[in-house]
């Protein structure tokens, strides 16, 4: 690629892409093989030159290892089985932990079993107490001796032939 700079005198400077200078004098001789063309007036006058030749040689890049297209290694059957074995074990451990600790799990079951046992004991105690109270009610309704005993204990009633003795404090 060339660039032309007009300096005003009859000598023009040409610069190539790699920084080399060429001088042009009035006799239209260059140190380069290209000739100066006049100003382009139409599309048919455009002429392209080839790329500038570089004086530098291209050195190949040396990599630590050669670049090759990376290929995925085919998974072997044992690797696939191991992967599924690990995933299934993680799933099983998760399910066991859920079974133990989540609401409605084993720990919650044993807590509720204790509550149920306590409620059964309370129920049996209350049923025995109810039986005793029914017997007492039946005795109050039918036995005159029991009625007198309750009146003496709870109401402070004394018989006709008895005396009340009060002691001072």
Image (spheres, rainbow, N blue to C red):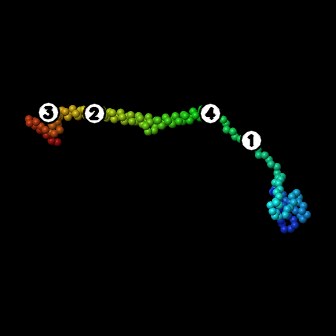
Q: Nearer the viewer, residue 63 or 11?
A: 11
The image shows residue 59 at horizontal and vertical percentages of 80, 47
Q: Nearer the viewer, residue 83 or 165?
A: 83
- Kindly report the distance in space between the C-alpha atoms of the residues bearing marks 4 and 3: 93 Å
Label 3 crowd (10 A; few <14 / some 14-19 / many >=20): few
**If you read the primary sequence from the N terminus, does the residue marked by circle 1 or circle 3 appear first?**
1
| Mark seen at residue 127 | 2
The image shows residue 157 at horizontal and vertical percentages of 13, 38
103 horizontally vs 39: left or right: left
The residue singled out by tag 4 in the image is 79
**4 or 3: mark nearer the eye:** 4
Q: Residue at x 31, y 34 (%)?
A: 123
The residue singled out by tag 3 in the image is 144
What SS does tag 1 mark?
Answer: loop
**If you read the primary sequence from the N terminus, does the residue marked by circle 1 or circle 2 appear first?**
1
**Is the Cβ of the residue at disc 1 closer than 8 Å to that at disc 2?**
no
Which quadrant: the C terminus?
top left
The residue singled out by tag 1 in the image is 66
76 horizontally vs 115: left or right: right
- Kindly report the distance in space between the C-alpha atoms of the residues bearing marks 3 and 2: 27 Å
Label 4 crowd (10 A; few <14 / some 14-19 / many >=20): few
Q: Nearer the viewer, residue 125 or 76?
A: 76
Q: Residue at x 86, y 68 (%)?
A: 9
Q: Residue at x 24, y 32 (%)?
A: 131
Q: Nearer the viewer, residue 118 or 52?
A: 52
- Kindly report the distance in space between the C-alpha atoms of the residues bearing marks 1 and 4: 28 Å
**If you read the primary sequence from the N terminus, does the residue marked by circle 4 or circle 2 appear first?**
4
Question: Which image quadrant is residue 35 in?
Answer: bottom right
What SS does tag 3 mark?
Answer: helix
**If you read the primary sequence from the N terminus, does the residue marked by circle 1 or circle 4 appear first?**
1
């Amino acid at each position: 690629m060339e660039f032309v700079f007009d300096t005003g005198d009859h000598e023009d400077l040409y610069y190539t892409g790699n920084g080399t200078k060429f001088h042009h004098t009035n006799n239209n001789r260059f140190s380069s093989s290209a000739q100066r063309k006049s100003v382009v007036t139409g599309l048919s006058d455009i002429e392209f030159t080839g790329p500038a030749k570089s004086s530098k040689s291209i050195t190949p890049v040396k990599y630590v290892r050669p670049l090759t297209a990376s290929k995925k290694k085919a998974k072997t059957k044992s690797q696939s089985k191991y992967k599924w074995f690990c995933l299934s074990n993680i799933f099983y451990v998760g399910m066991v932990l859920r079974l133990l600790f989540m609401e409605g799990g084993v720990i919650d079951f044993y807590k509720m079993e204790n509550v149920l046992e306590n409620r059964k004991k309370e129920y049996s105690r209350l049923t025995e107490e109810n039986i005793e109270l029914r017997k007492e009610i039946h005795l109050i309704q039918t036995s005159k001796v029991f009625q007198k005993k309750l009146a003496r204990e709870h109401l402070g009633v004394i018989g006709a032939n008895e005396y009340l003795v009060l002691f001072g404090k």
